[in-house]
Amino acid sequence: MKQRLSKQLLQRYQQGMCSAEENAFVESWYNQRSRKNNEKDIPELDLAAEDRYFQQHIFGPELRSRRQKSAYLKVAASIVFFLMAGAAVYFFSERQPSPQVEPFSVGQFQADLLIGNELVSLDEKKPFSSAWLEQHKGSKVALQTKKGQEFQMELPDGTIVWLNADSKLEIGPEYDVKERSVYLTGEAYFKVAKNKAKPFIVHVGKTSIEALGTAFNVKLYPNESQLLRTKLDEGKIRVSNAGRQEILLPGQMIQLNVLNGAFLLQQENRPQDIANWKDGYFEFEQTPLPEILADLARWYNFTYSLSPVYKNKVLSGKISKKDSFEEVLKILRFAGINYTIDKDKLSLVP
């Protein structure tokens, strides 16, 4: 029997109740709609056109009720996020970074290397070299990103570090002698080279995270939250704070309140990967809007204010970090969120 598009089918899709055949039908339909609305060299997403189409052809006058309008927005948002994730390959391969990071512009692969009193600007053409550490033994060494920047580096022992925006990683002066100690502010992902004789330790304030050979994400922006979050992908890590320790196994995540030392150990069964930022995506799973804005503001380099009306609003989805900020604004409009922009400030207002 030939499949037909309907409001009920879209609602089942949004609720995750469709069969594999129905999922494929909805996603194929939306991709076809997008292509028809975007016969251009650059396949930008005309979400406003899709919005009008939903209202005129699928939901019609029923959108007047608040309940049905809410359902429509959730369905539309889920399809939009799906499509944007599918378009990520294009953005990665075609879009070129701008020379400087401006407010509301896509972030760049850049960082500053501080060696003693010397500062070296790094980018894709001038990557980090472990030779600098050899040349400046005993000196204070740190890698720092601003808002709108991120960077990847390989330490002398082969450990790979991805440093997120507005973050700082200090490398201990005796790194790789008896142990491998680094000091983090912000967010980073570590893929640690195995060396049982020299434990790898990440210090985040008064918390230490020890690993032998593993891959894990660590996040703490003290000006935004008092919760330190670390999630383990491979191996095993030990998280220590104020005399208390927790061992993490793959797939587990810890939230640690740095003010009172409270641990919350979670088994991550959701499809969301909190470290997708290093692979070029923002991924949210019923994530509070304030947390989403904080991540976006670091990457697109802007300030923001949030009306109390939106503080409890949550969104789910996955989008490419190579998308222009205009695409983010389209998603906000799709989710029924009003905003104003003044210079480098985004204000979400009712």
Image (cartoon, grey):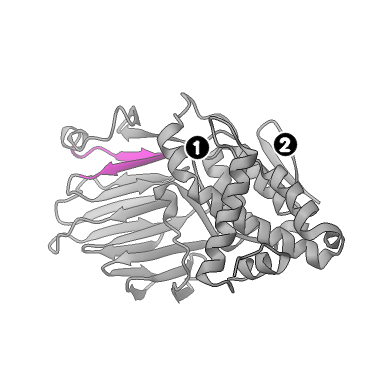
**Left-right relation of 81 to 122:** right
Q: Residue furthest front?
A: 1
Instruction: Tell me if residue 140 is in the magenta stretch.
Output: yes
* Residue 269 percent location from the top left of the image: 45, 73
- Say if residue 33 shows up in the picture: yes
Relative vertical location of residue 201 with respect to residue 156 in this rendering, above or below: below
Mark 1 element type: loop
| Residue projecting furthest to the top | 99
Q: Name the residue rendered at 76%, 52% in the picture.
A: 307
Residue 46, image x, y percentages? 65, 40
**Mark 2 lies on residue:** 341
Identify the residue position indicated by label 1 in the image: 148
Quadrant of the image for the N terminus? bottom right
> Which region of the structure is painted magenta?
137-155
The amino acid type of the residue labelled 2 equals Ile
Q: Is residue 112 left or right of residue 211?
A: right
